[in-house]
Every structure is written in structure tokens, then in C-alpha cells.
Amino acid sequence: MLDGFHSYSLLLLLICGSASAEVCKENDEWTCKEDGKCIPFGERCNGMPDCKHGSDESYSECKTHPRDMDHESFYCATGVSVNKDATCNKARDCPDGSDELPQICEEEIFGLKFKDLNMRGNCPNISEIECLPGECVSKAMKCDGSIDCSNGRDECLELCFQPCSAYPCFQCANGVLVDHDNICDNKIDCLDGSDEMLGVCTGNKESWIAKPMAICIEPPDGAHIFTKHTKFSSSNGTRFVYPNQPAELQCQSNNRTVWNVCTKDGSWNRELPPCRVNPVYLDADTNGTNGCRMVLYNKDIMRIHQVLADGQQVLVVPPILDVNVRFECADTYTFLPYSENGSTKHCQPDKQWLVDLQDFNPRCTKLCRPEELTQLFSLSPTCYDGEHGARVSCDDKYSLIPGTRVKFECAEGFMHLTRDVHYVRCTENGEWEGLQELCSRQQELCKYQCYNNNHVTTLSKSGELTNSLHASWVVPIYARKNDTQYRFACAGNLIGLNVVLTAGHCLYDLTTDDIRVGPTGNRSEIITEDYYEVIMVETYKAYFKINHNHDVGIIMLSRKIQLRQDLQVVCLPYNLTQPIYLNDSFSNVLSWSDDGSLMRTSGKIIEPRQHSGDVLIDLNADEKLCPGDSGAGLIMPCKTSSLCLVGVVSRSPGAGERESKCSREATAASIMSGFVQSWIEEIINHSPCLKNW
């Protein structure tokens, strides 16, 4: 790593000291920085790269001060000038493509097409940006002047380009506009440093002090090299990138790659992980001296079979040379690389394996199980290859080898209670060291960030549809109809990522196989797929089915739901600074109409029933609850911007309407008591760690 001054000085020396460079004609030709090639001066900054790595079209060469711009031209974010008629013609005329960006070509630049820009990718939350596959950051971090993505996508031209309404404007190379007063003020405002560059500021401001532009060169130790995915510049063999430019670097020793971004001071945005040095193996029979390399060979757990010409197999031991072999692992061990498992391999006379893999190194090992990482409902894992290795997929069990390190942070929908960072490690026995302890401490580390929008009071069940975004915790519960189908039975309320609260009588005498839970929003009458399976069904211990007192039940789902804008967790009324009083209070009940559309009713809690855990609700005129509304939640404001679940609909106390069995009066089971609270919190906080790992 070099600082800005020394990296720039090295660049100047490399440019000026190239012995093989051509002697270009002064004022007529321009010298390519890569190799000293001469090109006509008029071909510099014309949008068409003529130098090997495009140095004639780079922003370090083409950026200029606004007062030096031609008002009749369009200036790309890199500084290249093109004809105004070339913009928005569905042809890329700017080297950076800025002439075709939606920000200047869409009539409504804040329309859906511009706002999305494929930002979300495969991220589970609509409010996130996908940096690299599996790496997501909040949209709030977009274009905030700080590099948060490992590849810098949150500060890239595609997302940050701001159209210039009236020339002249100064635009950073990532499209962010800088005020004229901030140009050449000896303070770098652009992430790419272009507002303080020589070409921009020379002769334009007397107080400006010339400083060399920072660059980040390919690490000189040779351990890391740029991959083919890096659009690097070059000068006399030295490769580098400019500030705010992403680079993918690779460890030559083990082919592991990592993305990084050059900062405006000439340092890398993140510390480069050290490249793992291959250990020295002294056994000549396995280290590649006497035969093919297989340094992870363990005679106790790996068997090697030589495959003879007639198909017979005989056991052999290293060294392996000029034979066909197959590998076999002892029970409970897995052969790696798994893609080569069971196939015959040939060790050639030159002691090289005849395989497609670049670094074939047969091994038998135990693997850690990826499904155990998902048992931590409030913590989200990120997996790494060893102490300082690159990221690997936490879903690919063949990547979770001994030494794999997993970093846990609070999952989407949870708030951090501590700043501590937590790690577990895959041991040689294929077990996650520290996972059980971490699982049992979840409630000390993270807590739910429940639903905080109280705008459900404007819509009603008298005929007007409500928006599922305003009742994102409401889920339909289905009971078994036959071997393949489940019929809608009750409403439920999402109180955890895999926990649903409903009425106890909806679950009575049913097993986990008899119940399914659908996604939020409008429901279907019958479902055959697109549902959550159930691993636990429990009614409150004081529930009495004769009179339905304490009519509360809980369902535990087999997998966590993926939070999104229309699927959130409802707040529970516990640990509040201001208590909730049910008597003479108004409440909302959200459930479904007969056609499955999400609707709302509201009414007054008129009579808390003593010793039963129940309350009575008198609904507003023309509003009513019907069969199927059992389990729907009583919702009341509990904070300035939050809604709390205070009870669940149990039944109608009277006969109701003869034909529809609907009624304006309803009984609901309160969940306000300390006993119910303890029961609910015990299930939410401790159930994921009940499995014997």
C-alpha cells in the first residue's frame, strides 16, 4: 500500500522514465501512459479509447473546470465531451455510459424504473442494495460519501449520477454534483478526488495548491494481484486504480479473491486480508516429490484404490505415480473436492493430476452443517474461509470445512443490544464451536424491531379494502382438509420470525401435520403449496375449551420468514414506559372478508371479564366479525409510532346473525397478564435452542 504522494511520484517516474517509449510530436501527439504509444492529440478524450488501458479517456486526463467547458456539448461523468444529440439515443457514446443513464433519459427521473435500477438484486429486504451476491447494505447508505460495499457499488455512477440542470456544472466521476465554491479549495469533496485535480484547477484559482493525485497500485509484495474483473490503469508495467474505483484482488498462493476500493488518500478502503502461505510438507511421498501431490492424505480415514485395466481395484498407498485411482473415505467423512467424488483420477508420469481443477488436493474430512446456523433466529451468519480468508456461502455444506469461521450479527428486523462481534468456528469433528452458547444468549444480544406504523385506522371492514402494508403481521392459518389440501381456518399474528399467536381453539386437538400457515396479505380459501410448515403447536396452559377462557395458542414454524415491506413482526405490549388500559379503550381487529381480502374492523372494549382473561368488544355500526376471524389480533397504539397486539379474537358471545353467524359483539382473549407474557417470551426466546445438536 502506498500513500498518495509516493504512489503518484512512482507513477510520474514510470511515465517519464520509460526507455522504450516513442518520442511524440509536441502539440500534435499525446503519449499513452501505459506504454508511451503516440496518438493524435485530437483522439484524446473523444470517447473512443486508443491507448491499451484507455488512459486517453480516463477522468484523470479528461476532467476540466466548468468555466472551460463548451456549453454546446454534453460532458460525461469522466469528463469526456460528446455532442448533445448523442445523449439518450440508446447508443453508448460516453466511455462510462453516463449519456444513457435513466437520470437524464427518463421523463420522470424518480419513477419506479430509476429508483429500482436493479439495486435490490437478491437481497431479502426491499430497502437494501446488493453489492455482491450475498452482500447487502441499506439503501440509506447509497451515495452518502462513504464506501460501504466491498466493491463500492453504493457510491457508483449507476446509482449516484445527478443530472446537471444548467451548465456549467462540476460532476465527480461517480456523478455526484459539487458546488462551484467547493472546487479547487484544497479540500477533496469528490470520492474520486477530481475536484482537486491538476487538469481541473491549474490556472483557475490562485489560492489552490497543486498536490499529486492519489492512486492505489497493485500490492508490490506480489501476494495480491488484480484479476481480470479489475479495470486497472497501467504505466510502464505498474498497474493501479484511481480513487473510488473498485478492484478485485487475488491471492496468488490459493486463488482466493476479495473486492476492495481505492480511497481518495491512496489507501485501500478495507485492510487486505493476508494471503495464506501454503505450509511446507516434508513427506516426499505426498508433497509432490515422489508422486502426485496429496498433502492432506490421512491413512486412517482415506483409502486409495488403483483401478486396473480389467476394472479390478486394489488398495495402494502413496506415492501415487502413473496410475488410475479412486478415493474412498471412512464412514461419516466426506471427500473433497466434492465435484470429483467417486470419479477415477489419473496421476501422470510428470507427477501432475489429470483433472480440470487448478488445485486438486484430495481430502477426507468432516463438514459442519449449514442448517444449524439458521437455528439462531435473531442472528444472521456470514461465513469465511478460515481466519482471514474470503467469504464462502453459508448454504453450501461443502464449503463449511474445519477452520471455517462464521461471523454473527443481528438479523434483519432486530436491533443490536451490544456492539460485540460474535464468531463461531467449524472444528475438525464437524461441529460448530461456540454455537450452542451463542444461541442461548440471543435475547441478550438482539431484540425485535417490531412494526412501527399506526396508519391502519383509515380503512374499514364495511366494504373498503385495507393495505397489507398496514397489517403486515396478519397471516392465515389453514387446517388439513385431505391428504393434499388445507382449508382456511383462522387468523394469526406474527410475533416472531417463526412464531404465530392465534386463538387456542383454532389449534385444539390438532397436530403439527394438521396445520399450515400462509404468507401475509390476502388469503385463499384452500392452499396446496406456498405455505410454512409447523414444528410445534401449543395452547395456553389455562385454556378451558368448555367456556373458551384464556383462548390463546401459539404456532412455531419450521423456518424463519424473510422480512419484507409487507411482512413484519407486530409489537407486544410488554416492558412499556406507559401502560395500556383495555377498559373503555378503542381497538382495531384486522382479518379477512369472505373473498379473502384483508379488511379492518374497530370497536370499543366495553367490559373486561374478571378472572377469565377475556374482554368484550362492541364493534362500530355496520361492522362485524364472522367465522374465520378467530385468532385475529386486537391492535392498539402503544407508542408514538407503534402498534401493539393486546389480545386475540375468541368468539361471539351470542348467537349472532342466524345465516352468516356474524356479530357486532366479540370476545377476545387478553395477552396482557404477566403469566401469558412469560409463556409467550419463553417460547420466542428459547425454542430455537431446544434441539440437541
Image: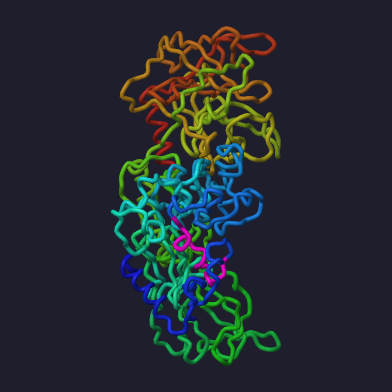
Determine whether, in the image, residue 679 is placed left or right of residue 51: left
**106 or 394: nearer the eye?**
106
How was the colour assigned to the protein in this rendering? rainbow
Q: Position of residue 86 (x, y in %)?
A: 63, 52
Residue 303 falls in image quadrant: bottom right
Please tell me whether residue 150 belongs to the stretch shown in magenta. Answer: no
480 over 400 or under it: above or below: above
Q: Nearer the viewer, residue 553 or 508?
A: 553
Residue 493: % across, % down: 51, 29
User: Which quarter of the rendered picture does the C terminus lie within?
Assistant: bottom left
Residue 59 part of the magenta segment: yes
- Is residue 689 visible in the rendered image? The answer is no
Residue drawn at (46%, 23%), measured in percent from left and top? 454
The stretch of residues the image draws in magenta is: 49-64
Where is residue 502? Give x, y as percent.
Answer: 52, 27
604, above or below 436, in the image: above
| Image spot of residue 294 (x, y percent) | 49, 82
The structure residue drawn at horizontal position 58% and vertical position 41%, both measured from the top left corner, is 533
Q: Nearer the viewer, residue 164 or 625?
A: 164
Residue depicted at x 39% and y 80%: 17
Quadrant of the snapshot with the N terminus: bottom left
Specify whether 419 is left or right of 298: left
Horizontal side of 408 relative to 482 (left or right) equals left
